[in-house]
Image (tube, grey):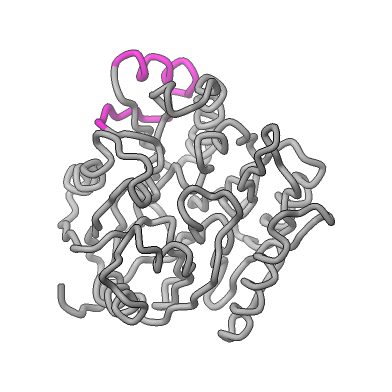
Amino acid sequence: MTDTPWRMPPEWHAQDWIWIGFPHDPAEWSGVIDQAQEEIAAFANAVAETGQEVRLLVRDGANEMRARQLTSAAVKLERRVYGDVWLRDTGPLVLSDGAGNLSARRFGFNGWGGKYLMDGDQTVGAELARDAGLPLETADWILEGGAIDGDGTGLVVTTEQCLLNPNRNPQMSREDIEGRLAADLGMDRVVWLRDGLLNDHTDGHVDNLARFVAEGTLALPVPTGPDDANRAIYADARDRAMAAGLKVVDVPSPGLVTSGDFIEPASYMNFAITTHLVVVPTYGTVHDADGVAAVDALFPDRRAIGIPARAVLAGGGSFHCASQQMPSV
């Protein structure tokens, strides 16, 4: 690929539609697939009620029937072959040249470092892009969409834990990856955070930790109690963001969220920004209302709402992970 003016619009840019993945494989959902389907359907319904088009991916006839039972008629169902719902990582990344043209980029996908390899996850992004009428280019290195977050000006934030992990691109240096982000996505200024959240099986995707909410403005969690397992991670991320000259704004953490003895990578930062709405995952903690209110204050042109996401979290992510937006021209 050659250097071009192509860049990913920020997520708060107007959108034509949003793709969302619907859970379909009980083996991937640890006994909570019914609840996960209900939570994803609530997400899809909330966005569709604002008038934005929602394209909910379903796997087969039975899965489509279940989705139709849970969603309003405003939600469009598309039958596709996909392994799991994490379209932030497997869907197309859509770029604009600022002159009315859109294009899609895809990258290699190896199941988050070889952990979860499922039929369709390597191909669904290209299929969605082509069916949307987008010209498509595919890069020759591994990258998931949840590993990066940009503000639309060429500035991107990521984590060393993920992009420098030898289970992704062991032959590439930090400088190599910076060059590829610039050439393939127009992201020419990289802010490197260190680690993502504890027990995040994606190896520290940044969209669960730090999100741009305006040009040069990064939202980061603050711990909400002495037992917050990610306290040191938040502090290190804040130090690095401020050293890079970013404006940092606070969003409270959900606090300690566990399943038995396992500390879940729960975060309000995995919100999905849509044209009219910001959908914030909630976890049934005493901090949920404060988390949603903090996100709402960051988007004066949109309304933020909280939707329960404990079952989606059990599958490995939340609403941002399970969706991918199609920006308007």
Residue 321 image point, x, y percent: 46, 47
Task: Please tell me which residue lies in front, 111 or 80.
Answer: 111
**Left or right placement of residue 172 versus residue 152 in this view:** left
Query: Residue visible at 30% across and 39% down?
Result: 117
Q: Answer with the quarter of the image where residue 296 lies.
A: bottom right
For the record, the magenta segment spans: 61-81
Query: Residue visible at 40% across and 68% down?
Result: 164
Query: Residue visible at 48% across and 52% down?
Result: 275
Q: Is residue 79 magenta?
A: yes
Residue 227 image point, x, y percent: 80, 52
Task: Please tell me which residue lies in front, 172 or 10.
Answer: 172
**Left or right placement of residue 132 versus residue 162 in this view:** left
Task: Please tell me which residue lies in front, 93 or 97.
Answer: 93
Residue 154 image point, x, y percent: 39, 77
> Do we see residue 116 in this rendering?
yes
Q: Answer with the quarter of the image where residue 196 lies.
A: bottom right
Number of labels in the image equals 0
> Do we see residue 16 in this rendering?
no
Q: Is residue 30 magenta?
A: no
Asked if residue 6 is positioned above or below residue 229 in the image, the reply reads below
Task: Please tell me which residue lies in front, 126 or 73.
Answer: 126
Q: Answer with the quarter of the image where residue 311 lies.
A: top right
